[in-house]
Amino acid sequence: MALKKTIGAAALAGAVLALTGCAVEAPVPYGANYAQPTQMKVRAAGHWDLMASDVVAETMATLERNGLNAKTPLYVALPQNASAFDAVFHDLVVTKLVQHGASVYNTPGQQLELNYDAKIVHHNLQHVGGYSPEAPDGYNRNGYYGFGATIGDADYQPVTAAGAPAYSEVLLTSTVLRQGQYVARKSNVYYVDNASVGQFAKTEAYRAVNMKVVNK
């Protein structure tokens, strides 16, 4: 009986040591790519129109689910230091809301306020495996693209001309507020060519400065 206990204890100790050794020697988790989804790419003002249609349709559906009538007074706010995109998108959203039968006013202080924000996301791509940021749509010499600060050929994914990702993105978030309460909110991410990034850049806010004129 004592011999069996001794053998059992030794086996248990060996198992613990083996598990401990595996835990110590196990490698850190390695990076893995997400399953390849699709993501729309903004190339023209016509695409802005489609983005506005999506925002308005989702907004109207959310308001209806929350029991808010389409005739509820609504104000669409223009972002501060509006970019070229912001100005055009504002007009598109107002037009489509009116076409959907919403009661849109051009003065703030209404029961509902819709605002939106477009943020540019830049990716720090390196010249790796033949990839060149100057190539059309972020292609490398083999017709592949990559993301991240340190990427290798294994991380490149095949692309097509229609769906080729660029190395900048736009995060568009629309929000409907009622006295400070979030009533509806939607966020979408779109690819955008680097050449078009300036259309989403906010204008600089200038402050008036009094200048003293000195007579000669």
Image: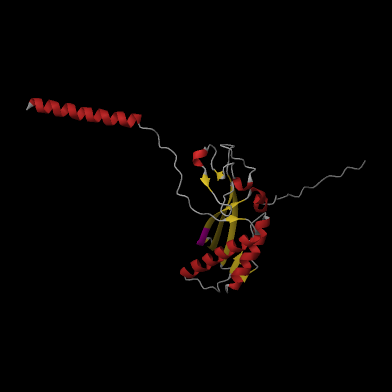
Residue at the extreme right of the image, as rendered: 216
Residue at screen point 48% across, 52% down: 37
In the foreground, 157 or 206: 157
Residue at screen point 11% across, 28% down: 5
Residue at screen point 51% across, 60% down: 185
Residue at the extreme front of the image, as rendered: 142
Q: Is residue 108 visible?
A: no
In the foreground, 195 or 201: 195
Using the image, determine if residue 110 lies above or below residue 21: below
Decide if residue 3 is on the left or right side of residue 23.
left
The percent position of residue 137, horizontal first and vertical second, equals 61, 48
In the foreground, 209 or 23: 23
Q: Is residue 184 one of those drawn in magenta?
A: yes
Using the image, determine if residue 68 lies above or below residue 122: below
Looking at the rendered image, the quarter that the N terminus falls into is top left
In the rendered picture of this protein, how many numbered marks are placed on residues?
0
Residue at screen point 58% across, 52% down: 161
The boundaries of the magenta stretch are 182-186
Q: How is the image coloured?
A: secondary structure
Q: Quadrant of residue 17?
A: top left
Q: Is residue 43 visible?
A: yes
The percent position of residue 57, horizontal first and vertical second, equals 54, 67
The percent position of residue 160, horizontal first and vertical second, equals 56, 51
Using the image, determine if residue 79 lies above or below residue 153: below
Residue at the extreme left of the image, as rendered: 1
Magenta stretch, main secondary structure, is strand
Decide if residue 159 is on the left or right side of residue 14.
right
Looking at the rendered image, the quarter that the C terminus falls into is top right
Decide if residue 187 is on the left or right side of residue 46.
left
